[in-house]
Amino acid sequence: MKKLLVSFCFATGLASYSAVAEPNAAPPARESIEWCDIWISHANETNLPRVLLIGDSIARDYYPEVEKKLAGKAFVARLATSRFLADAVLMKEIEVVLGGMKFDVIEFNNGMHGWQHSEAEYQKAFPKLIKTIRAHAPKAKLIWATTTPLRDGKGVTYDTKAEYSNERIAARNAVAAEIVAAKKIPTVDLNASMQGHREFHSDNVHFNVQGSQVLAAQVSAAVEKLLPR
């Protein structure tokens, strides 16, 4: 099933980019492997509110625990993707998910991919992320999740050879903080909870079971406050 979902996202992405790209426009800088994982549980049930987590592999890792914590209170879905903000395909992936299902609460993050893009590009593209989500889920309550820190403080991507660091993550989080505050979107600060906790990491970027449980507890608590009563 996951392979089918990834293939669907890839095919949708190719078609979508050709549809939205300007004639003769260069494609956005991408990683050598781009992926997408959509998971929607209880798709035919309507007796509980519905929650969507938008993020990357970190959100995909804490998703199962969020689903457990909100069991009986909400149905939780995920859209995990490697796409960077400036990629029009990301917006099409969001449109696909929001076009097929109504969500009451959407927690979203983007910041750990696309290191070949500058923070200025991140700042320019960020408002479109919010605009796209609101255009297709106008009644949903939104929560921004900060991008988590690195265990070793810095690194280099294996494919694009772009450098990334906690300083760059902090810069992206600062950009996002200013924009979401202006739009009165609440924030769950996942970065702060992981700072100084090397024991929560499974590698430089990702988190082990303990770390994912801490993240899931934060996300679940933030989401539950916004669920319709």
Image (cartoon, rainbow, N blue to C red):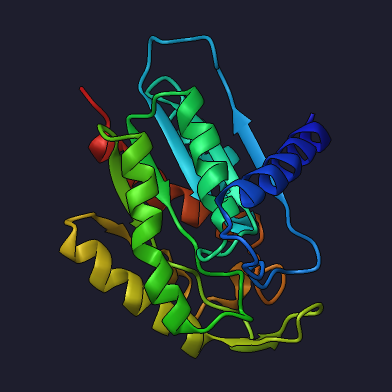
Q: Is residue 156 above or below residue 103?
A: below
Residue 105 seen in render: yes
Asked which quadrant contains residue 9, the reply is top right
Query: Relative to residue 136, is residue 180 drawn left or right?
Result: left
Q: Quadrant of the N terminus?
A: top right
The residue most toward the front is 23
Residue 55 seen in render: no
Give x and y (percent) for residue 227.
27, 31
Q: Is residue 159 above or below residue 1?
A: below
Number of dots carrying numbers = 0
Q: Residue at x 37, y 35 (%)?
A: 136
Q: Is residue 143 above or below residue 224?
A: below
Q: Residue at x 68, y 40 (%)?
A: 12
Task: Give the camera-side residue of 169 and 19.
Answer: 19
Give x and y (percent) for residue 174.
33, 78
Task: Give the camera-side residue of 3 and 205.
Answer: 3
Query: Relative to residue 76, is residue 163 drawn left or right?
Result: right
Task: Give the camera-side residue of 104 and 193.
Answer: 104
Q: Quadrant of the C terminus?
A: top left
Give x and y (percent) for residue 87.
57, 61
Q: Is residue 141 above or below residue 228?
A: below
Give x and y (percent) for residue 113.
61, 69
